[in-house]
């Protein structure tokens, strides 16, 4: 069982000025594609220290296997999610970032503007995605084929990574 948390990073949504559609769409995708239990969804403002604190809370105390931080990955002055993620991760996972950008780039040239960053803290994988519903879902779908395997390895699964290899 995969325990997931979805954090929507948005000043406007946190103030009630906009409706969060990306966070709920990501949560549903995690349930449908991974069979994940989404233990919590949360909306917080674009504040680096607060984002980092919530990531640490869910990774260190909340038992989350996966945290998806939705939003705050662009060029706007208050888009600080990548910096907050880098503040708390212990090991980067650049292949996930590259896969998300590459898949999104096939659909829009603006994907190259994404600064989405991911990594591992303890036994928790932290992914960041764009804040639009479409962008968040497309980015997450790009890594979905390998996500369950990666999370199993993170939890200590000793099985061989190559399913074709027989012992």
Image: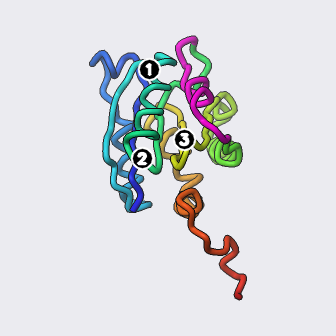
Q: Residue furthest left?
A: 16
Q: Which residue is mark 2?
A: 64
Residue 2 % position (x, y): 41, 57
Q: Position of residue 167 (x, y in %)?
A: 71, 88
Figure check: 136 above or below 79: below
- Badge 2 density bin: few <14, some 14–19, many ≥20, Cα 10 Å: many
Tell which residue pokes out farthest to the bottom in this image: 167
- Which residue lies at the image location 37% right of the left edge and 42% below the top edge? 62
Of mark 3 and mark 1, the one earlier in the sequence is 1
Horizontal side of residue 2 vs 138, given as left or right: left
**156 lies above or below 101:** below
How far, Cα to Cα, is label 3 from label 1? 17 Å
- Secondary structure at numbered mark 2: loop
Q: Quadrant of residue 16?
A: top left
- Which numbered mark, 2 or 3, is in the foreground of this view? 2
Give the numbered dot on residue 161.
Answer: none
Label 3: which secondary element: strand
Marked residue nearer the N-terminal end (2 or 3): 2
Most foreground residue, 77 or 81: 81
Q: Residues within 10 Å of mark 3 (few under 14, many from 20)?
A: many
* Disc 3 target residue: 127
Residue 164 placed where, x, y %?
A: 70, 82
Q: Give the magenta-colored segment's residue range.
A: 77-91
Q: CA distance from mark 2 to mark 1?
A: 18 Å
Side of 150 where 43 appears, left or right: left
Residue 102: x %, y % from top left: 69, 45
Q: Which residue is mark 1?
A: 50
> Which residue sits at x=37%, y=23%?
44
């Amino acid at each position: 069982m995969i325990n997931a948390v979805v954090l929507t990073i948005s000043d406007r949504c946190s103030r009630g000025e906009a409706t969060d559609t990306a966070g709920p769409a990501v949560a549903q995708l995690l349930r449908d594609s991974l069979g994940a239990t989404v233990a919590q969804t949360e909306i917080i403002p674009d504040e680096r220290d607060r984002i980092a604190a919530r990531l640490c809370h869910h990774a260190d105390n909340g038992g989350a296997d996966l945290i998806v931080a939705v939003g705050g990955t662009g060029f706007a002055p208050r888009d600080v999610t990548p910096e907050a993620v880098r503040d708390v991760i212990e090991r980067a996972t650049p292949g996930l970032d590259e896969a998300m950008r590459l898949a999104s780039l096939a659909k829009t040239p603006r994907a190259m503007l994404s600064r989405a960053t991911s990594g591992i803290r303890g036994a928790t994988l932290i992914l960041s995605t764009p804040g639009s519903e479409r962008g968040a879902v497309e980015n997450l779908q790009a890594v979905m084929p390998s996500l369950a395997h990666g999370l199993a390895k993170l939890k200590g699964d000793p099985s061989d990574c190559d399913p074709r290899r027989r012992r």
